[in-house]
Image (cartoon, grey):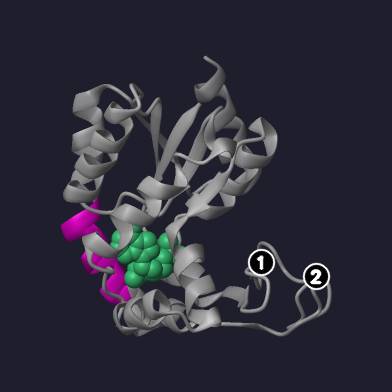
Amino acid sequence: MKIIMLGAPGAGKGTQAKQIAGKYQIPHISTGDIFRANIKEGTELGKKAKTFMDQGLLVPDELVVELVADRIIKDDCKNGFVLDGFPRTIPQAQALDEALAKMGEKMDFAIDVDVPDAHIVNRMSGRRACLHCGATYHVVSIPTKTEGICDACGNEVVLRDDDKPETVQKRLVVYHEQTQPLIDYYNKQGILKSVDGTRPMETVFAEIVRILEA
Ligand code: AMP
C-alpha cells in the first residue's frame, strides 16, 4: 500500500500518517522530519534546508527528490510506505511517478486532509514539538502529561519556528500556490480521496481506514 498524505501545514496529515504507518506496519516517510534530523546533526543538507524552512519557504525540489527516491527503494518499503510532506510541487510528483515507474510501481492513494485556513492558524499556534525526539503535541487536543515536557523523552517541548503565526501565514500562501495543484494532479490519476480534517483525530483516522480497506 503506497500512500501520499496531502493537506495544508497543520491539517493533521503527520498525525494521520503515523497512525497509518503503525496500523499497516509500513514506513512513515516525512521529508520535514528528515530535514529536521539533518539540521540537528548539522549536515550540509540541513544547513541548506534550514534557510528555506525558517522563512516558511519550500526547500528546492532538487534537494528533496533524490532523498525520497533513495528512501523508497529500501527494503522496508517493499510492502508500501506513507509519504508525509512529499510531494509538495508538481515537479516533485512527476519525479516520484518516474522513480516508481522505473520499479514497475505506482502510488495507490493520495489522501487529502482538508482543513480551512482559519482553523489551521488557530491549530498551529497551539502546536508543540520536542526538538529532541520529534514528537508533536497540541496544548488543547494532544497535551503533554506534564506541561512543557515531552512524554516520550522528557525534554522540553516548544513552538517550532516554522509554526509561529507569521511563518504559518507564509506557509499557507506557499501551500495554495505550489502544493494545492497536486489535488488536481492526483484526481486526474483517479487515486485522490478527500477527508474532512476538521473532525476529531480518531474520526478522521477511521474514515481513512475505511477508504484504504474499501
Ligand atoms: P513539514 O514538517 O512537512 O511541515 O515540513 C517543514 C518544512 O520543511 C516545510 O515548510 C519546507 O520548508 C520543508 N519541506 C518538507 N518537505 C518538503 C518538500 N517535499 N519540498 C520542499 N520543502 C519541504
* Residue at the disc numbered 1: 135
Q: Residues within 10 Å of mark 1 (few under 14, many from 20)?
A: some
Instruction: Name the residue tied to disc 2.
Output: 151
The spot of residue 2 in percent (x, y) is 46, 31
Q: Decide: is 82 above or below 88.
A: above
Q: Residue at x 77, y 81 (%)?
A: 149
What residue appears at the point 58 percent right and 28 percent down from the top-left corner?
209
Residue 36 placement, left or right of 59:
right
Q: Nearer the viewer, residue 24 or 144?
A: 24
User: In the image, is residue 123 part of the stretch drawn in magenta?
Assistant: no
Q: Quadrant of ligand 1?
A: bottom left
Question: Which residues are drawn in magenta?
Answer: 169-179
Q: Would you place residue 112 above or below residue 198 in this image?
A: above
- The residue type indicated by label 1 comes to Ala
Q: Residue at x 61, y 75 (%)?
A: 128
Distance between the Cα atoms at labels 1 and 2?
A: 8 Å
How many numbered badges does the structure rendering display?
A: 2
Percent of width and height locating residue 129: 61, 74
**Quarter of image, res 202:** top right
